[in-house]
Amino acid sequence: MVKTGFETVHLILLNMIVVPAWGIFLFVLFTIVFIIFSWLYLAGTFQRQRPYHLTGIGASESHFLTTIASMSDSLITAGYPLAFWSDIDTIQAARLELIDQAQTLIQFETFKMSPGKRAKDFADALCRQAIAGVTVQVLADSYGAKELPASYWQRLQNAGVQVLFFNPFSGRSPLDYLRRNHRKLLIVDQTIAMVGGAGISDLWDGKDGKSEQPWYDFEIKWQGDAVGMLTGFFWQHWLTAGGHVDLNQHHPGRSQAATPSPVLITPGEEPSTGDSPIRSLFQLCITSAQRRLWLASPYLLPDQITCEMLDQACRQGVDVRILTMGPKSDKAYVYYTSRQRYGPLLRSQIQIHEYQPSMMHGKIVLIDDDWVSFGSANLDPRSFFHNDELNLCTNNAQLISQVAAFFESGFEQSEVVQLGPWQRRPWQEKLIGRLGNFFYWQL
Ligand SMILES: O=P(O)(O)OC[C@H](O)CO
């Protein structure tokens, strides 16, 4: 058929514009995918796990603390837990109250901050104190706080708050961006510290589009020498982020506690896949349990060796129970990836309790009636190998009973996962789980 002049021009344009455009589009797409995979590959995302074998020490042994401290790069100090809260309104109110009480110095570092009422209330409190002359230092993780607009930080800075961001993206060292500051820490006047899991975010109020119920989490208020040490850990990060520390102005004060308990602090600073203080801490906790090992972690991605240690504990008659997030997780793909790895745990008769009302976000290990370890670290590769974390461990009897009650209430509001129904879960869940596991080392 003879083409008209118009059709010929149209065909020429098609060949000159549309075909090259598709070519460019596919080339750009391929390049982006190639860069992402190369990046993940170079970061060790697809590596095989190195062997790591550890067997036991009893939690009641007198040398437990020294052993666990030396093997997890932790420091031994002392402190007293003044309060334990597991209600989100109370936790956020207690933080604001503590900020209001500050006389000289407020230090705060965290991972998750997002726009909303909690972020506004927090900024109001910090600005009030900065304007009143209190030194206020805020260290926000540049990834975790990325949703907050520049105007939020500008308002804080205008009031005199010193704001720094942990590890912003740099084109000169892009892989470094995978290291995040996962710590959650508020210190006032170097005398009182609050450690827990809640971010500065309305998510913890249940505003996550899933449940409308507050997340299950906790916070502990501390007094004693441990607070001085936590101040030092904060300053390490502050210096790394480019901040100025004047030890003449704010010399490490000694927070007094009338009846201190031993406290172990694990800063989990800049771990690597070969050397992880947080992994050592978790595995030492697991291997030292003799009667009870209750473990809470929202994101539950234990590696094979940790699963074997949990299995061993079960075989030795230890009551091993795990409290974790349920279907109302804030990250569905991590939930399905976690579930994909339940098989060995369920076959070992380990009870996995999935919290039902909302997101379960507490991170704790309870060992017998003797020790409790808690803080920012999840049982996952990100906390083991990539993040800076902050965990504390103590044998304070009152805190142990409060933590046991936290677990018991969590178990009551959970469903125990059974092997049969788990095996019959929908294929879509299995598919997401398999895909998620492909990126296991970065989760
Ligand atoms: O990283 P985490 O464990 O502090 O959890 C943060 C939440 O997932 C916020 O989305």
Image (cartoon, helix red, strand yellow):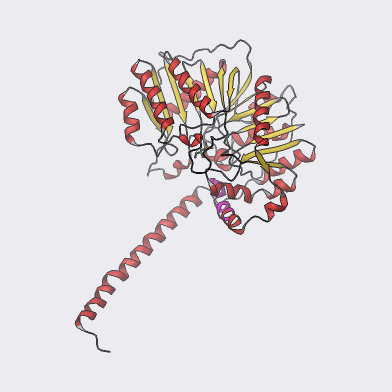
Residue stretch in magenta: 433-443
Going by the picture, which residue comes out furthest to the left? 5
Q: Residue at x 39, y 26 (%)?
A: 123
Q: Nearer the viewer, residue 210 or 315?
A: 210
Q: Does 437 appear in magenta?
A: yes
Q: Nearer the viewer, residue 21 or 327?
A: 327
Q: Residue at x 23, y 80 (%)?
A: 8
What secondary structure is the stretch in magenta mostly built from? helix
Where is residue 137 drawn, in percent x and y?
A: 40, 23
In which quarter of the view is residue 117 placed?
Answer: top left
Q: Is residue 47 visible?
A: yes
Going by the picture, which residue comes out furthest to the bottom? 1
Q: Residue at x 59, y 39 (%)?
A: 357
> In this image, 305 relative to 126: left or right?
right
Q: Nearer the viewer, residue 126 or 207?
A: 207
Going by the picture, which residue comes out furthest to the front? 212
Q: Is residue 244 visible?
A: no
Identify the image quadrant of the N terminus: bottom left
> In this image, 339 relative to 21: left or right?
right
> In this image, 350 relative to 254: left or right?
right
In which quarter of the view is residue 21 placed?
Answer: bottom left
